[in-house]
Amino acid sequence: MRLLKRVVHPAITEIDLTPDHPDSFTRIATRAIVIKNNRILLMYTQRYNDYSLPGGGVDEGEELIEGLKRELSEETGALDINNINEFGLYEEYRPHKSDKHYAEYSIMHMLSYCFTCDIADQLGDSKLEDYEINNGMKVCWVDIDDAINHNLNTIKNDKKQGLSIKRETYLMEQIKDALL
């Protein structure tokens, strides 16, 4: 898959830039690009006041396409996911805050594999996780320019925003240029 962008957080040094670094772990995720009638299917998260592509982590032993279908279905209720095509890879090296997952590591090597796909016209029920519900996540069809401008405004006005909104905004800009 073609590399769209590689981002290295300023706190990461050149010696840290290997996936087999002892303080690093790799997280593999998929992101779905679904466009209908010049609108894009996105997730809005109230807690962070941002739009993002539906998707998430691929389970151990799970193929990318299966992870894409599972995450897209869970988050949006998408049905009949088909016509799946590679769009590109967004690679990040970023500091990892200790949490219950991978607490022993300080660096996350994040690989976000993005795919275009089609879905049925009607969405089924989503199966959001508790933290997603608590963060106020909801699925929506949005004009891509509105979503990009909204995220840029959030970045400008909320200096506490993390790296994810920058990734998602960059991806939407690439999608707009390539597909719309």
Image (cartoon, rainbow, N blue to C red):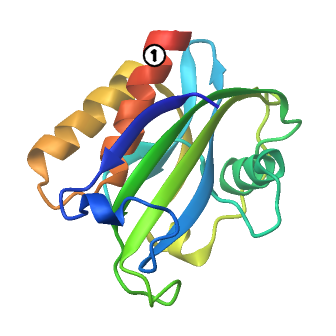
In the rendered image of this protein, does residue 14 appear above or below residue 87? below
Q: In this view, does 89 lie to the left or right of 104?
A: right
Q: Quadrant of the N terminus?
A: top right
Which residue is more in the foreground, 43 or 4? Answer: 4
Tell me residue 174's x, y (percent): 44, 22
In the rendered image of this protein, does residue 171 appear above or below residue 13? above
Which residue is more in the foreground, 53 or 131? Answer: 53
* Amino acid type indicated by mark 1: Lys
Residue 151's quadrant in the figure? top left
Tell me residue 72's x, y (percent): 71, 47
Q: Which residue lies furthest to the front in this view?
A: 15
Q: Name the residue under label 1.
A: 176
Q: Is residue 40 left or right of residue 11?
A: right
In the rendered image of this protein, does residue 152 appear above or below residue 21? above
Residue 1 showing in the rendered view: yes
* Residue at 10% from the left image edge and 47% from the top image edge: 157
Residue 31's quadrant in the figure? top right
10 Å crowding of disc 1: few (<14), some (14-19), many (20+): some
Tell me residue 9's x, y (percent): 25, 56
* Residue at 35% from the left image edge and 35% from the top image edge: 169
